[in-house]
Amino acid sequence: MKADIIIIGGGIVGSSIAYHLSQLPGAGTVLVLERDATYTRAATPLANGGIRRLFSLPENIQMADFGLSFYQNFAQHMKVGEPPADIGFRRQGYLFISDNGGAQQMEENYRLQESMGVAVELLSPTQLAQRFPSLKENGVDLAVLSDHDGWIDPYAALMGFRRKAISCGIAYEEAEITRLETAGNAVRRAYGADGTVFEAEVFINATGAWCTELAKTVDVAFPVEPMSRE
């Protein structure tokens, strides 16, 4: 099976990439390979759906700022007939608390965030207790609050991206990719667990926390590995 671009992984990252490629003139044919079409084993539906800009790197803040604006207008971007793509965006804010001597780093992050236009407040332990009486301030050094950040339903967002991408001509196939193969200095083939061979000029590894496992089949290592969260 051939395409100009093949995306391995059809979760929210892969489906977002597919949608954005569909908006680029001349991107060519795009195929998304997802090992679990029901998404019962996928990470996206299990995510908490937080949309925040409280990061310590300018690049992350810029990406999060784009994401916040995009998700606030998600229904308009993803419109494909009815019903609308409702991701339940809730602007409930994000609060980070520092203890054990992390106040200096938090204050540096705050200054960066504020300089980049993030509506963020720096709260002392006393101010934190006044704003959130249910929180115990024992051991708290400092806190930052961004009222404009919020939460979405990640599964609804995934389905919105997927439905819109398909409506724009993107193809999805259920396939579990077990290894990659290079020609020259680029990946040109991917092999499915059932023996199916996929060929493309460009492959995009969107397998999330498992990206290293697949990349190792062509001797590439990423500093990424899955971890358990509660």
Image (cartoon, rainbow, N blue to C red):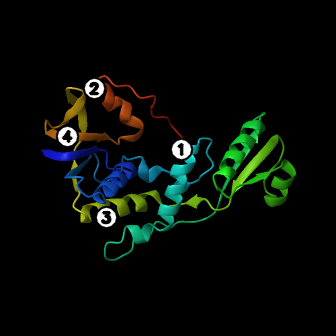
> Alpha carbon of mark 2 to alpha carbon of mark 4: how far?
18 Å
Q: Residues within 10 Å of mark 3 (few under 14, many from 20)?
A: many
Image location of residue 217, percent across then percent down = 28, 26
Whether residues under marks 4 and 1 lie with C-beta atoms below 8 angstroms apart, the answer is: no
Query: What is the spatial separation of the Cα atoms under label 3 and label 4, in whole angstroms?
Result: 24 Å
The residue that disc 2 covers is 217
Q: In percent of the image, x 51 and y 66: which residue is there?
A: 72
Q: Is residue 29 left or right of residue 7?
A: left
Q: Nearer the viewer, residue 116 or 96?
A: 116
Instruction: Give the residue displayed 23% in from the left and 57% down from the top.
Output: 170
Q: Which residue is mark 3?
A: 164
As measured in the structure, the alpha-carbon distance from the residue carrying label 3 to the one carrying label 1 is 27 Å
Q: Earlier in the sequence, mark 2 or mark 4?
A: 4
Q: CA distance from mark 2 to mark 1?
A: 29 Å
* For marks 2 and 3 on the same chain, the one whose residue lies earlier in the sequence: 3
Q: What's under tag 4, amino acid-wise?
A: Glu
Q: Identify residue for label 4.
A: 201
